Amino acid sequence: MAKQKSFYTLNSLLPFSIMDRYLASELLPPFLFGVGAFSSILVSIGAVFELIRKVVESGLPLTLAGQVFLLRLPEFIVLAFPMSTLLATLMTYSRLSSQSELVALRGCGVSVYRMVLTAVILSLFVTGLTFIFNEQIAPVAKYQATITLNKALKSERPTFKQANIIYPEYRRVKQEDGSKEKVLSRLFYADQFDGNRMKGLTVIDRSQEGLETLSQIVIADSGKWNPSENVWDFYDGTIYLVSSDSSYRNIIKFEHQKLKLPRTPLDVAQKSRDYGEMNIAQALEQLEIERLRGDDRKIQKLKVRIQEKFSLPFVCVVFGLIGSALGSVPQRSGKGTSFALSIVIIFTYYIVSFFASALGQAGILSPFMAAWTSNFLCLGIGIFLLMRIAKR
């Protein structure tokens, strides 16, 4: 009998054991069901009703509506992955508990921690899958959906800002009391932009350190970005050099002048992507643009959104732990109860996440804590539940 007991204990500790394969086979069907169910619900709320309205009111062709629908689907599948992980673990472990299979495993020397470990490892796999979808597939698909929809509804609409392009650039100046004050370093303005060349350009440059007054004003008929030399080519204009006493030091007229100014005004003029249409690298590039513009509110919001790009996939692990822990409690519940409990947990999680994100955007919480607070809170709850169950 001793050998048999040690056999079960050793087998329960081995990776990819018979128990792991059995639990994985039981977890897969409800997970796939959850992906289908939650994706259908989310895409209906987030896309289908809007597409139907555009078909009826704006005459959007049904073929293009179907194409946009398929392109929007990945972003909702990403959100469905964590929810499906919770549903699968909760339904599977609840069923095994109600049929006394978990009790039998514990009688064979398998601890609750070891039984739950299978769900956590599979949740880690789903986390990686969610990250790939959220980083490589969903942003590209959503961006293509936006382009397709715009072309179908407004084919003449350009993908760039046409008029009144304003780009302010700021810097921090140290004051006598040691504090730093944000002051205007450079102001870039263009009357029009046709996608290649800007017209009616005015640049007020105060970027030289130590100067409290204007250093130069550039006025040009037109200008465009020169990517080969990383400079701006200005045409038919005048440069007004200003001395420290605010008098004109020199006036230079030119037909063609190369100016070393940042490319950022071009990025501002071009239509920027929505947050959901950017991956992490593109979001970081947008963050640098916002930093140069000095819009603190947008900077803080974008920092929170970037952190949420990392925190969202790990919700799968948190939900996997909570679902398997709750499911391991001895109970007699059906699939309907597990589904209802999943909805309550998901709703509670996203309510907490919404408020944490709002506090982060307001600057009350750091971007990291704003994105990860709900994960840490639910992870703590999951560990607490697991420890309570293990003591029984």
Image (cartoon, helix red, strand yellow):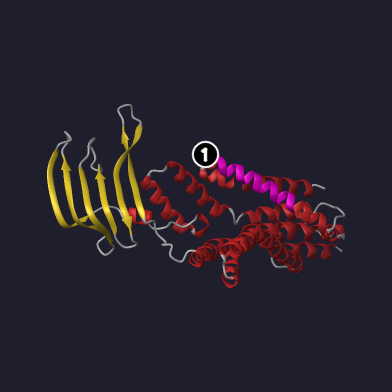
Q: Position of residue 231 (x, y in %)?
A: 25, 58
Classify residue 105 as left or right of residue 225: right
Q: Amino acid at mark 1?
A: Ala
Kindly give the residue lying farthest to the bottom in the view shown.
63
Please tell me which residue lies in front, 22 or 257.
Answer: 257
Residue 25: x and y in percent read 75, 69
Q: Nearer the viewer, residue 21 or 284?
A: 284
Viewer-proximal residue among 50 and 22:
50
Q: What residue is at 73 percent from the left and 52 percent from the top?
A: 343
On screen, 80 above or below 169? below
Q: Residue furthest top?
A: 177
Residue 174 appears in which quarter of the rendering?
top left
Judge the density around disc 1: few (<14), some (14-19), many (≥20) Cα neighbours within 10 Å: some
- Residue 346 shown in magenta: yes
Along the line of sight, which residue is nearer the eye, 375 or 69?
A: 69
Span highlighted in magenta in the image: 343-359
Residue 106: in sight, yes or no?
no
Report the number of numbered marks. Answer: 1
Q: Is residue 327 left or right of residue 260?
A: right
What is the secondary structure assignment of the residue under circle 1? Answer: loop
Give residue 287's position: percent from left, percent from top: 43, 51
Residue in the image at 37% along x and 46% along y: 293
- Which residue in the structure is indicated by mark 1? 362
| Residue 169: percent from left, percent from top | 33, 45
When asked about the image quadrant of residue 123, the answer is: bottom right
**Residue displayed at 33% across by 42% down:** 170
Q: Main secondary structure of the magenta part?
A: helix
